[in-house]
Amino acid sequence: MFDYSKTAYDLKRSICNFCSRLAQGLPVPFKKFLSCMVFGILASKTVILAEISRSLNEDIKLKKTIERLSRNLEKFSYTDDVLKNLSSEVKRYIHHDTPIIIDLSDIVKKYGVVFENMGKIRDGSTKETNMDGYYLLEALIYNHGDKLLVPIYSDLFSPSEPGFKSENEEIIKCLDKLRSLYGTKGIYTMDRGMDNVLFFNYFENNSQKFVIRLKKNRNVIFKGKEINIVDLVKKYKGKYSTIIKKKNGKQRKIQFGFLPIELPEITGKVFNLVFVRGYARKGLMLLTNLDIKDGKDCLRPILCYISRWNVEEFIRFKKNQYKLEDVRVQSYQRLKNINFLLTMAMSYISLTSKSISSRKMIFILQEISKRVHGIPPFPYYSTADGIYEVLKKHKTGIAEFLNYTKKKPKSQQLSLFELRYCKSLLVS
């Protein structure tokens, strides 16, 4: 049997310590707000403010807690400060060959009519277009060793937002922020939606390594002649081969190779076109500026791109486990902030899972989650379920860890004046 009280105490202390590090330099009210929101999201397993407020179990009316959280959610403007503090936690896990995965997702509000700045988007799940909702831009790192993802950036935006220019501008804003925090570390890994000369130029101008999957209509220059990449790759079988594991767990033999090419839009710069047969149904064609000399070098961008599949599971986890698409706040600023705070809650799960000192607690949480088929390859579900089960049974919030300024209870000891007054009454 597990000691739920001790586990709950250790868990609350761990969450509050993490939040205090993220909130360094913030005004005290927002330090407490960030801790309450991250704890409430983890404890309630939702982004609905009423449920978050219930999980805090404060000694005031529930309505007052909801109003306070909603008010601070509108006023919170410290995302840059929090991201900077988060980078101090994450930097130790980012190396020169760490994939930094950029992905575009969405929140569909099919029946929403009063949400602010709601725009027309494409639903990535159903492939339907002209749906009401918002876009999500996510950035995560992936380590091949422990196979764990850590979110390092998330932003919600809308095509109907005043001043909105384009999706590409939002991605460039994300890349600028990451470059300011992490320099030129990592290999930026992106899907076909980012097959754009704008990004190729950006990475080259900033000395940043990248791997981007190309669209089939992309033309390149090979041996002085312009040719479509599909027609070019058909001529080559692939010099190297290896066995890799697909996202469904099955092993496949792939053949791959690389070709030095140029882009018609960027003259005088040589890139590498990496092609893979046997993995995707119609193969993979990746553009990269990584140096490639042999099969080992050629495998690096392939493994980077394959790691990108994990982001889809992460976004599914974010939407389903914490009911992100069921968010009820209507203000655009509140929507952006609640998505950001949910990302910080998920960063806590990720970084705690990677921490050696927290492995015992993570093991206990995963055991408490009582998975039917054991711990899955994507372990965040079991960890999140364990956190929820522990905090659900412990009916106190986190006020004791937040150093609230409380009024001292009135002393029960009588003063000399009061003693003298009581004595005069007795004598009379």
Image: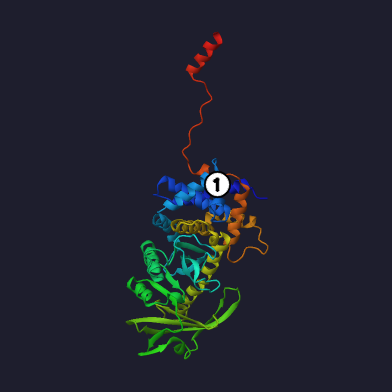
**Mark 1: few/some/many CA within 10 Å (<14, 14-19, 20+):** many
Q: Seen in the image, is 84 located left or right of residue 347?
A: left
* Total number of numbered discs in the rendering: 1
Q: Position of residue 28 (x, y in %)?
A: 42, 45
Residue that numbered label 1 is attached to: 56
In-front residue for pair 116/423? 116
Residue at horizontal 50%, vertical 57%?
A: 342
**Residue found farthest to the front:** 113
In percent of the image, x 36 and y 72: which residue is there?
A: 203
- Give 373 or 158, whichever is nearer the viewer: 158
How are the colours assigned in the image?
A: rainbow
Q: Position of residue 72 (x, y in %)?
A: 45, 49
Quadrant location of residue 188? bottom left
Q: Nearer the viewer, residue 393 or 278?
A: 393
Q: Residue at x 52, y 21 (%)?
A: 414
Q: Is residue 228 visible?
A: yes
Report x, y in % for residue 322.
56, 59
Q: From what the image shows, is residue 374 above or below residue 306?
A: above
Residue 143 visible within the image: no
Image-based side of 139 in relation to 204, left or right: right
| Secondary structure under the numbered disc 1 in the rendered image | helix
Q: Residue furthest left?
A: 268
Q: Quarter holding the C terminus?
A: top right
* Residue type for callout 1: Leu
Percent from the top left, x then y, of residue 386? 61, 55
